[in-house]
Image (cartoon, rainbow, N blue to C red):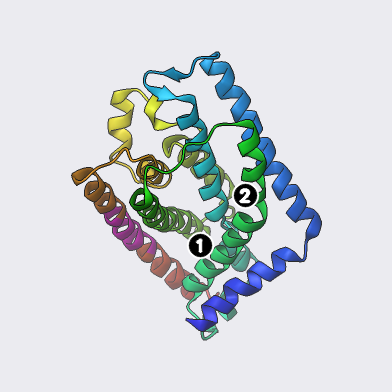
Amino acid sequence: MNTYIQIAAIKFRNNMAYRFEYVMGIVNTILNFLVYLCIYKALYGGASEVDGITFSMVTTNFIISLGLTSAFSKNEMFLQDKIKQGTIANELLKPVNFKFRMLFEDLGDGFFKVVFNFIPAVIVAMIFAPIEPPAGILDLALCFVSAVLGYIVLWHISFIVQTLAFWLFNVWGLVTIKNVIVNILSGALLPLWFMPEPILRIIKFTPFDSIFFTPVQLYLGQLQGYEIMLNFGRQLLWIGILYVIGELLWRKGIKRLVVQGG
């Protein structure tokens, strides 16, 4: 495990070497927040709430989603680049698990963006927008646990898309489509409170709402008792399903690589 922690630490330190990119990351996060703040202010038209959803709940949803997006940072071209460069075979010979290496590099990148991009941006954003405090200490703790599970869900979705690089020349288009779908159906862009009920019922049969929206609901204390257990169960179920799919594609891809003499 120390090896993988060192991999994450190296990725973290490498990001610190690019000062300009670090500053632009803060600017980008602040601009993202301010743009969406202006959009929601216009939609609310000065009203304090719409259909029981207060303006501060919406801004809180976006702030948490923005923070999780930073934490969930991933190099989605990692596997494709190794395959294109022809170095994938050498990578597989190294005495580390390739998937764990991908995971911990992403963790190092995500941790950097939370500390040096998101937190400074939030301090600035709090000046311009109301943000709800957590419903309680327990709710905050449950939100954190759910966010970790949400990260694992999203990482496996990303890994599944990346494994398609064994069969496709370029997965950039699929990654873009995946990101759009995730942003919309997870509640990162439009809080799922505003989704029509029929669409929301369909979303509940997908893993997407468990990535961002479940942690937000826990933070605001909107889930209680049985609902908490149900949502944690859904996250764990999707982790299991996505892991199996990703593992099958990975093994088939590796077998195809070996057959082709990769």
In this rendering, the count of numbered labels is 2
- Along the line of sight, which residue is nearer the eye, 202 or 167? 202
Q: Residue at x 81, y 54 (%)?
A: 20
Residue 66, position as x, y percentages in the image: 55, 43
* Left or right: where 30 falls relative to 222: right
Report the amino acid beneath label 2: Phe
Residue 76 as seen in the image, left or right of residue 190? right
Tell me residue 217's x, y (percent): 36, 40
| Chain-order first, disc 2 or disc 1 | 2
Q: Secondary structure at mark 1?
A: helix
Position above or below: 61 against 24: above
Q: Amino acid at mark 1?
A: Phe
Residue plotted at (50% across, 62% down): 166
Q: CA distance from mark 2 to mark 1?
A: 34 Å
Q: Disc 2 on helix, strand or loop?
A: helix
**Image quadrant containing the C terminus:** bottom right
Q: Which residues are magenta?
A: 236-246
Camera-side residue: 117 or 201? 117
Task: Classify residue 227 by image quadrant.
Answer: top left
Residue 156 x/y as whole percent: 42, 58
Residue, x 55% and y 32% (percent of image)?
130
User: Which residue is tagged 2?
Assistant: 118
Left/right placement of residue 189 relative to residue 157 reads right
Mark 1 surroundings within 10 Å by alpha-carbon count, few (fewer than 14), some (14 through 19), many (20 or more): many
Looking at the picture, how far across and down is residue 113, in whole percent?
63, 56
State which mark lies toward you, 2 or 1. 2
In the image, is residue 2 part of the stretch drawn in magenta?
Answer: no
State the mark number for residue 166: 1
